[in-house]
Image: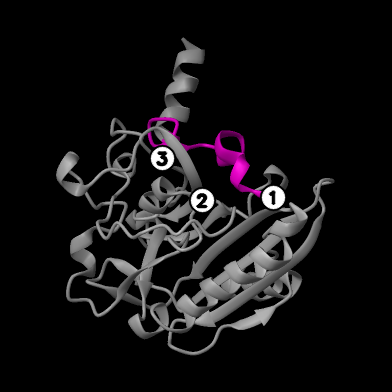
Amino acid sequence: MMLLLHVLMLSLLSGGSARVVQDFESECGQFFANGKSPTRFPGQQYRQICQTLNNVYYYATFYDTDNKIPVYSAYKFEGLKGCVRLNKWYIEPQLDDNNGSPNMNFETGVKKQGLGKHQALNGDYESSRYDRGHLAPVYQAQSQSCAHATFTLTNAAPQNPSFNRGQWKKLERNIAKELSNQCLPKRYTIYIVTGVVPGAQKIKNRVNVPKHFWTAYCCLDNNNKCQISSGFIGKNENITPKRKTVKNLEKELATLYKVTSFQLF
């Protein structure tokens, strides 16, 4: 009986199934360098999501249910695949329904009661003047199916349109070019993590508008050592993100998140 109660409690804490999980290092650790996730914050508002479409894991997201935006998404880069955009957005059923599907789904296909209590919905972005800004991007996706899986609102945050379609888009392409030229020819395994820092404003009094977007990559050699790495951070406006070492980006993020330390890889 005690074992049954323990299992039930873990189920409730994790969102009710294996895709919104208690520990995504053990469930989908393949998206983290050496299996170790970036820093996770304590608190019931945070959820660990192994992003799942058609029962396949594509990347991992650390999600903030209070601000209704991700903290970060972690994924691997395997070269440019020429993926096309889906332009329809999924949600995560398990965030609002413990018995919901472990797969991301469209709003029309999920239970309406309580929907949106712990996550953003498409209606939040309508007439908001903000884009749904991808963290794990279409351009760097591992496959067309993975590109489709990036279109979930748990992988998006309100982004200034001129920034999203301007300097941030340019940065995503420049990073892909760097990695294709510097890391893939050496057969390094490439890990990327992209996140946001919450701001002071919300759209429709529900979804936090980040004040910063950031990203970092690490190229591991055959000995699992990070040989090539870099980080970038920019304000949520159309200015060029600043390039930093991973160590310096970690220091800045620790200050912005108001924590003693923040580890990316």
Q: Is residue 203 left or right of residue 134?
A: left
Disc 1: CA contacts within 10 A as few (<14), some (14-19) or many (>=20): many
Q: Residue furthest bottom?
A: 239
Residue type of the residue flagged with mark 1: Ala
Q: Residue furthest right?
A: 223
Give the mark, 2 or 1, whose residue is nearer the N terminus.
Answer: 1
Residue on which disc 2 sits:
142
Residue type of the residue flagged with mark 2: Gln
Residue on which disc 1 sits:
33
- Inspect the magenta stretch and tell me whether residue 85 lies in it: no
Segment colored magenta? 13-32
From the image, state whether disc 3 or disc 2 is nearer to you: 2
Give the total number of marks visible in the rendering.
3
Residue 69 location, x and y as percent? 39, 61
Q: Is residue 128 left or right of residue 212?
A: left
Residue on which disc 3 sits:
52
From the image, state whether disc 2 or disc 1 is nearer to you: 2
Residue 121 location, x and y as percent? 24, 58
Q: Residue at x 44, y 54 (%)?
A: 63
SS type, badge 2: loop
**CA gap, disc 2 and disc 1:** 16 Å
Disc 2: CA contacts within 10 A as few (<14), some (14-19) or many (>=20): many
